[in-house]
Image: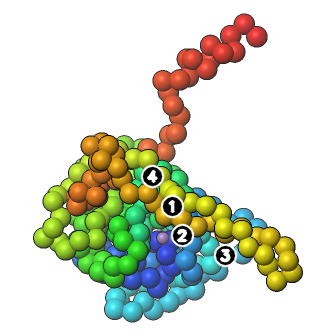
Amino acid sequence: MRILVTNDDGIFSKGIIQLAKSMSRIGQVVVAAPDEERSAIGHAITLHKPLRIEPVKLPDVDVEAYSINGTPADCVKIGVDVIMKRKVDLVISGINRGPNLGTDVIYSGTVSAAIEGCILNIPSVAISLVSYKSDDFSYAGEVAVEVAQKLLEHGLPEGVLLNVNVPAVPKGEIKGIKVVRLGIRRYAETYIKRLDPRGKPYYWLTGEAIDATQEDMQLDTDIAAVNQNYVAITPIHLDLTFYSLMDTVTGWFKGQ
Ligand code: MN
């Protein structure tokens, strides 16, 4: 089995090194990842500058690895096409430092890499550790292997990928796996206004996610699940169409 491993935190981040190690247990791993952090880049691809593929040696793991001066989606596209010559059985992206929950999947480079795999018709997974501080990606690595094995055993319908979030608690405190829908992640954020050295104003987005409320915790969402120490798995479909409103909107334009 040939596995393409990528991420959005950059090729030398701890999470991807753990993921490469863990996935090596079940297949031949090729790492193709951004040369620097590209978190929150979404699904951007590079059209107006050349992409370079540099072979690199990753610490602590003996796999083929390439650093690319592009986005996570670029890395999957060029990784599948050029590096792996379209022989890829699984794309797995992560292990991200920090959660990718709810509406945040829209901004996420980690999830976008898996979406790109999905667009290319390859079974794809995004996996994140719900902590910006923890350095211990080992349990999330075990989860990655388990999810990949199940996915390859059972398959997925076209246009669907799996988004996985792993709580950053000791393995013994994990309550199990929950398959849940995406929640709505709210932020207390604000643009800080400052002046640059030439006296012109600039703005910098700052803030953090608002903790889930008691009400939020009752819902069957990824946010509630990880808060209760469950591994959250959400099947994500690429089709954003809201089918149940199509007839209504058609009605708006009747008789024109
Ligand atoms: Mn990231």
- Name the image quarter holding the C terminus: top right
CB atoms at circles 3 and 2 under 8 Å apart?
no
Camera-side mark, 4 or 3: 4
Nearer-N-terminus badge (3/2): 2
> Which residue is at 13% across, 70% downward?
172
> Disc 2 designates what residue?
39
Quarter where residue 151 is shown: bottom left
Local packing at callout 4 (Cα closer than 10 Å; few below 14, some 14-19, many 20+) is: some
Quarter where residue 53 is shown: bottom right
Nearer-N-terminus badge (3/1): 3
Along the line of sight, the residue nearer the viewer: 48 or 176: 176
**Which numbered circle lies on residue 185?**
4
Q: CA distance from mark 4 to mark 3?
A: 34 Å
> Which residue is at 49% across, 45% downward?
238
**Which numbered circle lies on residue 141?**
none
> Disc 3 designates what residue?
51
Question: Seen in the image, is 132 located left or right of residue 151?
Answer: right
Along the line of sight, the residue nearer the viewer: 131 or 137: 131
Q: CA distance from mark 1 to mark 4?
A: 13 Å
Mark 4: amino acid: Arg
Nearer-N-terminus badge (1/2): 2
Please tell me whether residue 145 is drawn above or below residue 236 in the rendered image: below
Q: CA distance from mark 3 to mark 1?
A: 21 Å
Q: CA distance from mark 1 to mark 2?
A: 6 Å
Camera-side mark, 1 or 4: 4
**What kind of element bears circle 2?**
loop
> Disc 1 designates what residue?
108
Local packing at callout 3 (Cα closer than 10 Å; few below 14, some 14-19, many 20+) is: some
Nearer-N-terminus badge (4/3): 3
